[in-house]
Image: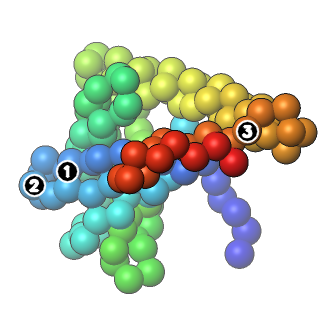
Amino acid sequence: MRERRKGLRYSANFRVFFPEFNMWGHTSNISLDGCYVAVDSSMTVGFINDLLIELPVVGVIALKGYVQHLGKTKSGVGIQLVQVRFEPDQSEYYSLYLRFLKGMSQLKEIRENYLELVKQDRLKLCTLPSESGKVEIT
């Protein structure tokens, strides 16, 4: 099957709310064009949705998208985001989302740099303390 995605996807676990369905979900990945939302859904392909997505540091933004595809077990939906230019606030939310995604690529690069330094034994990979309170540096 040929890959139809245009943009780079990032693994991301962000909370999502669909007001029309009073339904919560969470993303498993996001891109400039859309996102996949894990949600028990009765939505149908082509249905246009309002969705609220909680972006770290930024906060909750309102977007619009249509259901591009359903998950294999209807446990999720692939949403293609749309920018509705005649709704000024929606256009601004979309702009914020695009700016956030550009930042995601920088964070990915920073993470890759960190892991490369670990691989070169120039840094140790740190983790947060376990419940026992012990700090681990590998």
Kind of residue at disc 2: Asn
Do we see residue 118 in this rendering? Answer: yes
Q: Residue at point 70% right, 63% down?
A: 3
Residue 71 placed where, x, y %? Answer: 42, 73
The earlier-in-sequence mark between 2 and 3 is 2
Of 58 and 62, nearer the camera is 58
Vertical order, 31 against 93 (above or below): below
Q: Is residue 73 left or right of residue 107?
A: left
Q: Dots 2 and 1: beta carbons under 8 Å?
A: yes
Of labels 3 and 1, the one closer to you: 3
Residue 70 on image: x %, y %: 40, 71
Report the residue marked by disc 2. 22
Location of residue 102 (image quadrant): top right
Left or right: 135, with 108 as reference point: left
- Identify the amino acid type marked 1: Phe
Q: Which residue is mark 3?
A: 124
- Outermost residue, right direction? 120
In this rendering, which labeled residue sits more in front, label 2 or label 3? 3
Question: How far across and down, in percent of the image, does residue 95 sit?
Answer: 43, 21
Please state which amino acid type lies under the numbered disc 3: Lys
Numbered mark located on residue 10 in the image: none
Which residue carries the number 1 mark? 18
Look at 36% across and 33% down and name the residue there.
55
In the displayed structure, does residue 64 sit left or right of residue 7? left
